[in-house]
Image (spheres, rainbow, N blue to C red):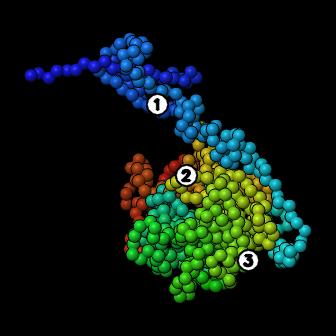
Amino acid sequence: MPPQTRRTSFPKVVIERDTDSEESSSEEEDVDNGSVQESESESEEGEVEEAKVEGVEEKVEDVSSLKKTGKQPITISLKKVCKVCKRTGHEAGFKGATYIDCPMKPCFLCKMPGHTTMFCPHRVATEFGVVPAPRKNMQNPLEYFFLRQLQPRIHPIKPAFVIPDQVHCAVVRYHSRRVTCLEFHPTNSNILLSGDKKGQLGVWDFVKVHEKTVYGNIHGCILNNMKFSPANDGSVYGASSDGTVSCTDLETGISLSLMNLNPNGWQGPSTWRMLYGLDVNPERSVVLIADNFGYLYMIDMRSNEVIGEPLLIHKKGSKVVGLHCNPFQPDILLSCGNDHFARIWDMRQLKAGSSLCSLPHKRVVNSAYFSPQSGSKILTTSQDNRIRVWDSIFGNLDTPSREIVHSHDFNRHLTAFRAEWDPKDPSESLVVVGRYISENYNGTALHPIDFIDITTGQLIAEVMDPNITTISPVNKLHPRDDILASGSSRSLFIWRPAGESEPGQQRAEEKIVVCGKAADAKRKKFGADSDDESDGDMFPSNGKNIKNKKVALKSTKYSIKKKR
């Protein structure tokens, strides 16, 4: 018996549109040979559901007649739908190089309702609403001690700021994963150390540009923090998310594991310990490390042995992401973590719950640092888009002296933003921090690096490069020279003041080194010999360093556009 074909009448497809929306093009909607097809539009009008009905003869039916027969029409909406609040009539997200806020949500920058990020007063002027905290009369003996002993260290006249605003050299795709931390060599001004998400340690001589080394056998995952040994500037300590603390010799790449919190390997997320905060107390010859469960560990630098038992310094189960010893009095320790607090400790009487002071924040605290010259100020960076400043650790610490609204609240897959002091500034007022919200510069979305005066909240400068379209969350100012090092994605950039020249300065195109697959493509394009270059993404596994000798690539010179 031949198969029979059942003929069924399909309901009519009704398409709803916004009255103010633009008409769909022929590519978005096509009705041909009785088929209705809609494809998802990539333009700014929003997402449109895709619908396709094939093999149906065109019929002109009235909707009311369909309802009488019991067949409901299929409705396909082409109205604008917000991706944030899921309501119709408006859009949110990037439109070209400009980000549009959802009008139903608070401002993404200051977290306050009533306006959007585009018209936020803190975006127009970072010093908006920043009022210095009133200073009380000197009633505290500590205040008297501060004014007599520590205040002379702070320069009475604020010097002119020198801003490194031009890319001097760069190594592109240096790491195989995003950069997580940077550190300048304490004695050799030309050496920059960098860590990445894969746990690799990079050593780069940014004056010779092409001399770079990557050690890939030190850690198994994220290298969160590193500090140089005060007794040996050829060794560096590192704390990683694999639960290990390493001491690496920079010449040979040989690493010594000082502590391993996961000797049995992966046993589940409830027991896996990761190390984040790290600092060195030179007076006690102790390395301080903190984990993701709120505990503090101490290692003797002379014997490389763990001292005592772990000490709970933050809420149990919360990450302690930052540790910093006071440069003037190393026994005073500053910690910060995911429990929304920064805490001050005295290492001479260190025990659980014995913090000298707790500094509350509204969200996670990414970093907390003492000021580099006197150690009397505190600078914190929080996920609530606030940079907080305490002018004196001897004064009232209940509330910060200043709160500066700045865009550094981010989602996943990005290294946390940290506002860093300028160690050369005698007035202890200049900090540098990357910006999350992009700005539209000639049709390109760029993420500047901001220099802020914390005494007034004023934006001193915002530096950017049209060739750097990625976010730069990791930034470090040189302790002796007017140099800024920034880590953007997998690349490293060295910034110097515009117009600064060096004797025997190389050509600009010779100071941009490209590693990895991009370098291979560049070699093929320009016909370079493969014997003259080595792959920058090749990492050693036996402790030996690889020094890549790159041929200068003829690329366009980096140009800088500053927005005052």
Which residue is at the front of the view, 467 or 490? 490
Q: CA distance from mark 3 to mark 1?
A: 61 Å
Identify the residue shown where x is 61% and y is 84%. 285
Q: CA distance from mark 3 to mark 2?
A: 36 Å
In the rendered image, residue 415, in percent from the top left (x then y), is placed at: 55, 58
Residue denoted by label 2? 411
Which residue is at the front of the view, 372 or 424? 372
Q: Is residue 489 above or below residue 347?
A: above
Residue denoted by label 1? 48
Residue denoted by label 3? 328
Q: Nearer the viewer, mark 3 or mark 2?
A: 2
* Callout 1: SS: loop
Q: Earlier in the sequence, mark 3 or mark 1?
A: 1
Q: Which class describes the residues within 10 Å of circle 2: few (<14), some (14-19), or many (20+)?
A: few
For the residues bearing labels 3 and 2, Cβ distance under 8 angstroms = no
Q: Which class describes the residues within 10 Å of circle 1: few (<14), some (14-19), or many (20+)?
A: some
In the rendered image, residue 454, in percent from the top left (x then y), is placed at: 76, 59
Asked if one can make out residue 418 in the rendered structure from this viewpoint, the answer is no
Which residue is at the front of the view, 552 or 214? 214
Q: Which class describes the residues within 10 Å of circle 3: few (<14), some (14-19), or many (20+)?
A: some
Left/right of residue 327 with respect to residue 232 in the rendered view: right
Q: Earlier in the sequence, mark 1 or mark 2?
A: 1
In the rendered image, residue 549, in percent from the top left (x then y), is placed at: 45, 63
